[in-house]
Amino acid sequence: MKKFVRVMSAAVSAALVLTAMAGCGSKAGGSSDGKIKVGGIGPISGAAAIYGQAVKNAAEIAVEEINAKDDTVKFEFKFEDDENDPEKSVNAYNKLKDWGMQILMGTVTTKPCIAVSTETNSDKIFQFTPSASSTDVIGGQPDKDGNVTIQRKDNVFQMCFTDPNQGVASAEYIKEQNLGTKIAVIYNNGDAYSTGIYQKFDAEAKKLGLEIVSVTTFPDDTNSDFSAQLNDAKDKGADLLFLPIYYTPASLILTQAAKMNYKPKFFGVDGMDGILTVKNFDTKLAEDVMLLTPFTADAADEKTQNFVKKYKEKFGDTPNQFAADTYDCIYALYEACKAKNITSDSKAADICAALTEQFTDSSFKFDGLTGTGVTWAKSGEVSKSPKGMVIKDGKYVGMDK
Amino acid sequence: MTLISNLINGISLGSVYAIIALGYTMVYGIAKMLNFAQGDVIMVGAYISYICTTSLGVPALISILISMAVCTILGIMIEGLAYRPLRKASSLAVLITAIGVSYFLQNAALIIWGSTPRAFTSVVPFKSISLFDGQLTITPESLVTIAACVVIMVFLTLFTKKGKMGKAMRAVSEDKDAALLMGINTNRTISMTFAIGSALAAIAGVLLCSAYPVLIPTTGSMPGIKAFTAAVFGGIGSIPGAMIGGILLGIIEIFGRAYISTQLSDAIVFSVLIIVLLVKPTGLLGKKITEKV
């Protein structure tokens, strides 16, 4: 009898523990006040903070606008910092999951996003990144030997161009506008983003018959000396310098090129966006720098004007394209949620399935700040067209003729 | 012409490494510890000078002096608060503390100054010198850095050889306990070493950011590691060794990048270090001392 009691009590306590754990599990899914919980992750401290900050700000504006509407779909937004570190990003993701996140809008930068997208894929949480542009984020893309090393993560979609797209678009743009005959490239070979763009640029340039005379690299964004790279480009007579890199090293390259009296045309991609925000930076150095970006703050349409005005009022800053992509992300989520009648009571996995269906539906077309008639492929890639920008008197000006 | 240009760039980059390496070597030579926070003191020095010139409108030269003063106090504080309590602890504990201090400084800078990069205005008011119809340009920053490096090296050598404080430093370096018995205040001597090392870091920070004008909280970390390598390369503890090590490292880095491969430049730098240490374990100018660790 005594033994029986002991066994019974053990069984009862085990059952209690299990129910307690099940209670924990059910926390994720549904909030009480009728708002769909959208999480955001990105660096708001550390070297890439400017991107995460822009995303956080823009998401807050978009969510505020949507919640002010008299509509069934409302969002609750919570943002976590990852300092552009994959490990911290996964921690941030787990924290948001504990909070009850139903949709993830993020992460902002590529490396952390590759890590987090693997997690969301196994957890079946819909992930929509405004700015992580590597194809490793969405997966399913063949590498240069044609092998698919990362399987398609079918819950992950991008609002920004993929790196290969940027590389191809840059080469086409340079060819079309006849910007340079001898091209030099400096890229960051420690960074998936930069290397990805360069590889596609190189392949496309060869196809188009553009001559690349110098290709040099640097190991990470804290690199400070670019004299050898610039000397190489100058020696080989390059008249256009393609910089598929972030703006911090780019600002050093511009300064050092000016010091050595080397004046090629500079051409950047979306990582270059932000160069004008470097404090105390002599914007004269960035004069005539060209970049491909899907958004410009001085576009004349009402939507852009409205957004820029609000952003300036609230944060005292001009929004960059990360902010614009984010604003579009939230609105695209809003439209998709409305189309699929998603409510705050829906389970994350159900939301994920419904949104995936909606985003890959060819009739789903989205009009936003960064493009009109934007669609998504089954691969998770976005289809929209980039705009060429050139910096004049410290401001972006459209380059398209 | 490119060869000369690369050589000058190499020497100039190497001189920055050399000045930082002098700080490492001073502290190691006397306190027998690796102060990994040296690189971050550089960053603080650069920020102080930046703020003095841009926000307070102080002339560049005076901003360097202010920055040196602030860094000196910072160095003494770090030594007193973080390292002095560990004077009797194992060298491993001190090493880990140093790494902790380094992270502390980086993150404190992140909180105080934020992560937005700042473009540092060069403290050197001259224009680039253009030779051979513009084929060769020498930046004034390189010349000033090289000159500063030589002056500091000579000053430090004389200081440790001649002055009373220098003698005390060398005595502490040889044997801390014996020096104490001889009536030398070892704590004060070590503080003084940190003060000098940190003042050097301030100069290095200003020169580094003048030559490569982007200032972020992690600005000092990579140059700090390279300078540590330079100090080991030249023979850690040896003042002329740090200078030679620094300059050679700069030249190897730039030449490796220009003539071998930009992808492998850092690998080349560290391979050279490994080879030198295999052939001469004490570094180029290092003295052979039997050490108990």
Image (cartoon, helix red, strand yellow):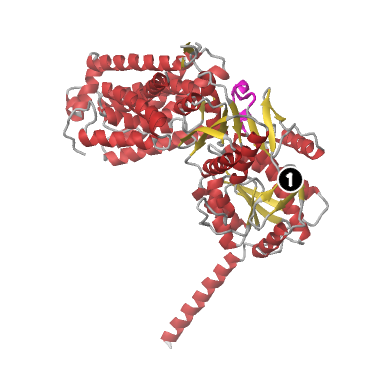
Task: Give how far across and how far down residue A324 sits, in percent.
Answer: 70, 41
> Vertically, is A60 above or below A23?
above
Q: Per the image, is A280 magenta? A: yes
Say what amino acid the circle numbered 1 marks. Ala
> Vertically, is B259 above or below A172?
above
> Vertically, is A261 above or below A272?
above
Q: Which residues are magenta?
A: A274-288
* Residue B11 figure quarter: top left
Asked whether A245 or B185 is in front, the reply is: A245
Task: Give how far across and how far down residue B97 sits, in percent.
Answer: 36, 38
Asked whether A207 or A259 is in front, the reply is: A207
Task: Give how far across and how far down residue A126 sits, in percent.
Answer: 64, 58
Kind of element beneath mark 1: helix
Q: Residue lying furthest bottom in this view? A: A1
Q: Is residue A397 visible?
A: yes
Would residue A114 appear left or right of B223 to someone viewing this image? right
Q: What is the total number of numbered labels drawn onto the structure image?
A: 1
> Vertically, is A334 above or below A180?
below
Would residue A301 appear left or right of B198 to someone viewing this image? right
Would residue B222 appear left or right of A127 to someone viewing this image? left
The residue that mark 1 highlights is A62
Q: Quadrant of the N terminus of chain A?
A: bottom left
Asked whether A139 or B169 is in front, the reply is: A139
Q: Is residue A74 visible?
A: no
* Residue A267 figure quarter: top right
Task: Give how far across and how far down residue A199 sits, in percent.
Answer: 53, 43
Residue for point 76% across, 38% down: A307
Would residue A136 appear left or right of B204 to someone viewing this image? right
